[in-house]
Image (cartoon, grey):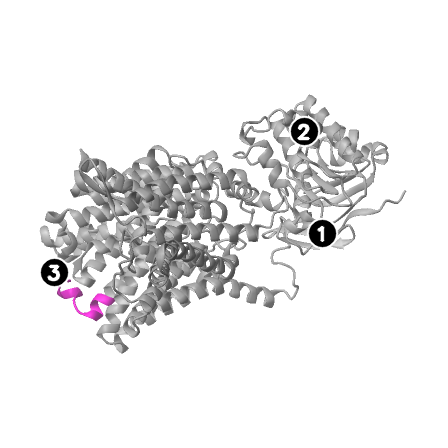
Amino acid sequence: MKLEAKLEVSGLNSFYGQAHILYDVALGVGAGEVVALLGRNGAGKSTTFRSIVGLVAQREGQILFEGQEVAREPTYAIVRKGLGYVPEERRIFTDLTVEENLEVGRQPRRDNAAYWTTEKLFTLFPNLGEMRNRPGGRMSGGEQQMLTIARTLMGNPSLVLLDEPSEGLSPKIVEQMANAILTMKKEGVSILLSEQNLHFARLISDRAYIMERGRIRFSGTMAELEARPDVRDQYLAV
Amino acid sequence: MGFYFVQFLTGLASASALFLVASGLSIIFGVTRIVNFAHGAFYMLGAYIAFTLTERLSGAFGFWGGILIAALAVAVIGVIVEMLLLRRIYSSPELFQLLATFGLTLMVEDLVVLIWGPDDLLGRRAPGFRGAVEMFGQNVPSYDLFMIVLGPVVLGILWLLFHRTRWGILVRAATQDRDMVAALGVNQKWLFTSVFGAGVFLAALGGALQIPRDAVHHALDLRIIVEVFVVVVIGGLGSITGAFVAAVLVAELNAFGILILPKVSIVLVFLVMAVVLIVRPYGLFGKPEAVARKTPGLSVRPWAPFTRNERIACLVGVALAALLPLVAGNYALTVGAEIAIFVIFAASLHFLMSVGGLASFGHAAYFGLGAYGVAFLAKLAGLPMILCLALGPLLGLAGAAIFGFFAVQLSGVYFAMLTLAFAQIVWSIAFQWVPVTGGDNGILGIWPEQWAAGPARFYWLSLGIAVAVVSILRIIVFSPFGYALRGTRDSLLRSESIGIDAKRIQWTAFVIAGTAAGIGGSLFAYLKGSVFPDNIGIGLSVDALVMVLLGGVETVSGAVIGAIVFKALSIWLVSQTDWSKLILGGVIVLIVVAFPKGIVGMIETWRHSWRARSDAPSAKPAGLAASQPEGAE
């Protein structure tokens, strides 16, 4: 099945100062797909995400979002086109309440993407609805993680980059997170998520890429990855 | 009783104006991280323009309309400045924006004299608030009562703005993490511009509202900027409520300080600020500064000691400088000696700033202490010059040891403000302890002995000491101590976790820098034959900052070039034109835009790209051969 491409990255090279971090990274996400970017700590997953949304200044290569070249655009312009980004460190505005955090993420309705209101997000993440006026700094890690996803959804993105959504969360919250991601998928949001946790990725993803040392080492469906224990051992086993 | 109550009300009225200006500075710093030195200049412009408008426009509407239009006009000027100047330099090293706004301040100081003349201007009384109200048998100007009400009203309006509008919520979010705000689709450019415009509006409004209370003159900017810095720091940067509370505190300290403790009135505010910062390092209502998210590996070329060729070039430069007395006259040699002294001063601050990452706003304290040290030893103890020169800087060392101990407990802007407070304390001691320091009259008659007398000899002496001090500072940079200091600068946490006693290293660096500045001050006392409180003043501290930033703060010894260029230019301009500040400010602004890394930083970039081009014809960034990414995330 060939899907309409949401995101096509090719020949992506990124640098931090003199350090060359990403080498010719190429990956794609189709409309309505959930794609996992797997790899160990330090493989370059976060840098890939940060490069796509323009937070890494030194980068070369092609980044097509909905068929449009965005590599030269500033971060805010890329995000406004409907490419949402959820950073790994959460980066909640701790002085702002839950509702104010959501307000920062709010963008106008988009024709080709699901429309999110605060009320709809409080149904998706019921915990948040119970603490609308609580400052972000007085929330647990799991609640913050939900808030950061909800905040990005307020921008009505058609594609979301989720950086390690399960990191540091308790098993029960991880389960809630998986359900939330599947709901997002049902709403038509395409998702590219980075993960170290293969089990979590398996629950929700259609396809996977594996990164190591700044390069894409494997690309295939989840079923194909299942059939390759050698790949899993080489690039994912700790 | 009645008298004290009225004094209290006067303090509250001053607090309102102070709060307006301080809240503007606070929100600008919170979002853009710019320490807007030009904030006082915008305040002054607001007062001048309001003066003209209220004179021209008639009636009650004319007065109040004039005030409002003046504030709006200055806000438009602020927006233009932000778009044309500051937007270009947001990515420059921290504090570089301070240099740009300092250049602007210089320009505005001359411009207002050009437009409005040098005399004090007395503005109109406010219609409806001309009279006085009797309270406890004392007359209170009704305009003061208006101001007292205005302060809390503005506080309330700002609170609503920041909590009930989308713009305000974005501003608060950006104060905490502006990159994340951009990653949520907000165009930072316009957010920054609007915040800067709003902050400047508040400053100009504060200035415009002062015209019925105070004469308008061209030194208003420096008077207010220091007070406002103090207010913002005591209240906590980025906190509007904090700015309000601190404005009341500072204004009341000023109002009662003069009554109760006239001897230490000037120092009182700074003492309170120092105590607040030592007890609550982020001010009364402030929160710890979010750790700046630095891109790893940002400094592309690590510092290296001079190569053989560079050493030869430096020796040739020094030799040429030593030959100056063969061709130059007495005036040029005196200027040369002064430049050499400022090279010492700038290099000492540069050491603290670039190697230690500690930007001191009060470095003149140690320069001045060195100068006073010499004056005491020469005049009171009658010691020979060589001993004075050797022992005088010890006063700078002692000052740096005491103040540095407290200062290094803080970092960033708070460190800068605490050092400023300490410098002001030293200044007011020199200014107010007349029996010992001579106060404003200074100490006169400190002349070099025969062996160092005469322009040529003194020039050689200054040059020799300058070369020695700069060399020693360079050696320290590349010593194990220098590495440890750079470690604490780049990551306090990591350096502590590998067993470096970070605070002690920074303290030591502070003492080294203070002593070096003291050496410069000692020579300066002999150059001028006198010492004055000005040798400790804010102006001198700012000059040193400008020299460092001009040279390039990311270089090893850029301040040497920065000091030579700045000092030579300013001395030459003063001798050539009445509008030296206008031109000097313009030159600084141009340099900021043209050389965002400072003069030496720019030269190094050119040299490097030239070398890279001749080494390898490929257009790829340098150093790609190292292909093992480590810690890629």
Rendered image: mark on residue A122? 2
Image quarter of residue B618 = bottom right
The chain ID associated with circle 2 is A
Which of A159 and B328 lies nearest the eye of the viewer?
A159
Measured from the top left, where is residue A30 in percent x and y? 81, 44
What amino acid is at disc 2?
Phe
Left or right side of B326 for A137: right
* Residue at image coords 73%, 31%: A237
- Label 1 in the same subunit as label 2: yes
Precedes in sequence: disc 1 or disc 2: 1
Residue position marked by numbered label 1 in the rendering: A12
Measured from the top left, where is residue B191 in percent x and y? 55, 50
Residue A156, placed above or below residue B454: above
Distance between mark 1 and mark 3 Cα atoms: 70 Å
Residue A116, placed above or below residue A130: below
Residue position marked by numbered label 3 in the rendering: B445
Image quarter of residue A232 = top right
Q: Residues within 10 Å of mark 1 (few under 14, many from 20)?
A: many
